[in-house]
Amino acid sequence: MTTSGGTLVLAPPYREPGTNGPARPWRGAPASGRARTARPTRPPSARPPGPYTRLFRIPGARAFTIGNLIARLPMGMFGVSAVVMIAGARGSYALAGAVTATGLAATALVAPWTARLVDRFGQARVAVPATALAVLGEIALVLCVRHDTPVWTLFASYAATATVPNTGGMSRARWTHLLRDDPGALHTANSFEQAADELCFMLGPVLAAFLCAALFPEAGTVAGALLLLTGVLLFSAQRSTEPPAVPRTSTGTPLRIPGMAPLLAVFLATGAVFGSMEVVTIAFADGPAAGPVLALQAAGSCAAGLAYGRVRRGAGLRGCLAAMTALMTLPLLAAVATGSLAAVAAALLIAGMATAPTMVTGMGTVQRLTPRDRLNEGMTLAVTALLGGVAAGSATGGWLVEEAGAAYAYAVPATAAGLALLLALSAHNPRRDRQ
């Protein structure tokens, strides 16, 4: 309607010129001599939050993640710190290696039992006292080295650290509990956890070496113990996100679950890739450049893990292992063809991009296979298999370095990756392998 001289006049419906469409009501024309006032425009809509932003909007997620990252960082510190501390005080790298190997073997035996208690009684009730015992073992090792006690006390002290809980597994168990109805978000969470593993194992040795060199030989072990205890206390205090203790509904161990034993064999071979790659790279670099070169591999894996978490559907385990097998040949080719450390470093950066997706997919498979009341135990068994593979790969890589030279020893990680692929192919189940 319009007004004319104060009189109300109804106007006919208005039709756009040259169109035959339905008429629309007249909205009024601007007054003579007046410019039409522009309607306010809506601000452009904000971009939807990314998958990681949505992940950490879950109440309590940031708090338990911060605590877990603090607790996980020392996992990359303790081995380096112990070697520096013991070798510096006793003058023997062989003794230092034997002590750390004993601690690794003890952890492989004790960790599944600790994880079983976590599943049965809850994370906070078990993780805190188990961590306290492990910290006491680290402090006892420092005192034994400091006061030149008999050699057997070094082995006993470091073996006592085996009660340290699998903090990465407990964090993954929380995500599984919080995201049990959202497989896509759980995939993103697993990718973040793997990237966090890579970051901690990249920064941990660097921090430990710096502390031992800049302060005193025991500084890395002491700092690692304090970080571990602080992180576990912060993590365990977040009770709102803790999975409830689940009454036992299954019998036996996760090893009896169909498909679990072949999957652990794949983890064993994958661990050999990591262990041999580290030893061979240290031998090939033969100097202080070894640390930064290994950090490049971890950086590539960390970046790939974060990128992998943004995809809606991950690849199958066979596909990831096939990619890792192909990419692990690059360091061998670079070392043999060029002999250049820069070329090997670039090859390691690219090869590292296959490891995080492989681990994310493998851990996701473990989570799907394992019952809720055995989840921490199942993931700890996977980590134990990895550690066993790391030890075997380190020994094999070191042997081939002595026999054939560091360049040709890069054949060990490539062969181990191929073996992991063959094991996955022989045990392939399309339903389990689907991400």
Image: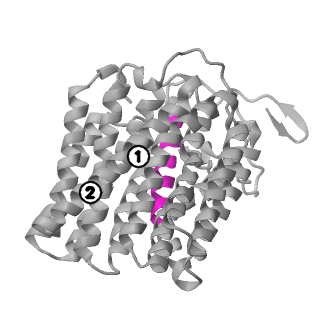
Q: Amino acid at mark 1?
A: Tyr
Say if 385 sits above or below 398 in the image: above
Asked if residue 107 is among those painted magenta in the image, a careful observer would answer: no
Name the N-terminal-most of marks 2 and 1.
Answer: 1
Q: From the viewer's perspective, tell me whether residue 112 is left or right of residue 224.
A: left
Query: Which residue appears at 45% of the width and 44% of the height?
Result: 108
Q: Which residues are magenta?
A: 185-202
Q: Amino acid at mark 2?
A: Ala
Q: Looking at the image, which residue sits at the far bottom?
A: 214
Query: Which residue appears at 30% of the width and 35% of the height?
Result: 265
Residue at numbered disc 1: 308
Could you tell me what secondary structure mostly forms the magenta stretch? helix
How far separated are the C-alphas under marks 2 and 1? 31 Å
Q: Nearer the viewer, residue 388 or 70?
A: 388
Q: From the viewer's perspective, tell me whether residue 375 is left or right of residue 399.
A: right
Residue 77 image label: none
Residue at numbered disc 2: 395
Image location (x, y in percent) of residue 127:
67, 43
Q: Quadrant of residue 332?
A: bottom left
Q: Does residue 332 appear in the picture of this structure?
A: yes
Query: Which residue appears at 50% of the width and 70% of the height?
Result: 81
Query: Which residue appears at 39% of the width and 30% of the height?
Result: 435
